[in-house]
Image (tube, rainbow, N blue to C red):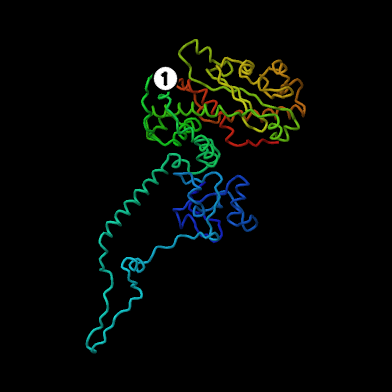
Amino acid sequence: MAESRSKCCCSVPQCTNSKQKQPYLSFHVFPLNEDHKKKWIVAIRREEGCTFVIRRGSTYVCSQHFTAADYVPGSSRLKVGSIPSRFPWNNFHVPPQRLSAFERTALRLGVDVRVQEQQVVETAPNESIQVEEHDYAAQPPPGALDEALQYIEELEARLQKMSLGKQTVLNRFCVSDQTLRYYTKFPSQEVFQVFWESICPSASNLVYWTKAQRMGQEASPSPSPARKIQLIDELFMYCCRVAAGLREQVIADIFGVSVATVSRTIVTWANYLFFVLGSVPIWMSKQQICSSMPENYRLFSPHLRVILDCTEIRCESPTSLTLHSEIFSSYKSTTTFKGLVGVAPCGAVTFISQLYTGTISDKEITKKSGIFDLLEPGDVVMADKGFTIEDMLSSVGARLIIPPFKCAKQFSKQECEKTQAIACLRILVERVKENHIWDSVVPLTLSGSVNQIWHNCCFMVNYQGPMFLKE
């Protein structure tokens, strides 16, 4: 990950590069992965201790210690797993300074003007001393100016090509992890790059949604038009709409395209990500659950398999009274879509149901979702008080844990701990609704893609990293 602040200094021994003196260099922080981080420390021949401490945001390695193969093509970002390898102790040296005017003249004319002795003619005392004329007025060889002009044009063309490859909307807006987290919900540029590299090969064959609809109607459909924006910017556009909740008109102004292009791109990427991410298995086995379970939940319920909770998403009310009555939620007193999410004790989303109408009950949505086909005998399911599914769980040999009902004046210590444990884990389900597209009412124009967007939001919560719960 490259930094652009002016106080960056390289931490490699014998390297004095800094962003203030060499603004054209990029500076990279040490990786978060401990094994990868140790490889960097060994490569630069440093050891962590009292004299060298790696701190996030103040310890960097400059781009002169990486090869061109270490970078993602057309970007200043490093590939995953890149290690610095160019140092003074392995025959790497900084390119020499530009030749002086005397040296350039000597190479051009074939005469070393620095050692050329002045020819003094001994004459009578009243005669002057004759000295050779300097080469200020020397004419360049024939064709030299034409070659220099052609070389300058080639350099300008290469510079323009390189600058166009880096001028993405993503690079302009997401200059730090904080801004990237706001627009995309990814915790860092490194995690975003890993996600992008995993979907890039298949995304390069992406067909716009309107084009895919015409392919089923036309005998010989016309080829797709050239994309107006780069492919990675299309993913960034989708994240701006879903994660940041920006309106389509605002996104159109940012990217310099029409609102129709924004709408078509969002629908295309919603269906594409749903197709790609939906093929990834996220249900965890018993061994995976046991190995990743926090210690406090291991003591509380060692056989806990999944935490279930339903959440509702407000949607625009249709004009049809029949449709309005089907999606009206008496709990929210408005029209909603309803979905079921399953979370493992470690905080990872392991089950995602499709969206149902707001009139459906928690018990019915649990039955229709297919979660019972994944449970095994001996499993424990944690849920809220509204999930009266003990009889359905007993049919598959599983057991239900819900918060205790208040019968006495106050809860016992064990009941309080049980209620707090369930409440803490139910917070994890709400991370899905941190995507700001759910802050406002979902328009009916997205009704055909809202289920795909819902699934993508639930799945991509796992890229946000673990949510540390209080013991």
Q: Residue at x 44, y 53 (%)?
A: 24
- Dividing the picture into quadrants, the one containing residue 289 is top right
Q: How many marks?
A: 1
- Dividing the picture into quadrants, the one containing residue 146 is bottom left
The x and y percentages for residue 324 are 50, 13
- Residue 253, placed above or below residue 338: below
Q: Amino acid at mark 1?
A: Gly
- Residue 462, placed above or below residue 449: below
Q: Residue 128 vs residue 96: left or right?
A: left
Camera-side residue of 445 and 460: 460
Q: Residue 135 vs residue 461: left or right?
A: left
The x and y percentages for residue 18 are 49, 56
The x and y percentages for residue 225 are 36, 30
SS category of the residue bearing label 1: loop
Identify the residue at the far top of this view. 322
Q: Residue at x 56, y 17 (%)?
A: 358
Crowd class of label 1 (few under 14; some 14 to 19; many from 20; radius 10 Å): few
- Residue 107, placed above or below residue 192: below
Q: Residue at x 26, y 83 (%)?
A: 129
Camera-side residue of 456 and 153: 153
Quarter of the image for the C terminus: give it: top right
Q: Which residue is mark 1?
A: 216
Identify the residue at the far bottom of this view. 125
The x and y percentages for residue 171 are 45, 42
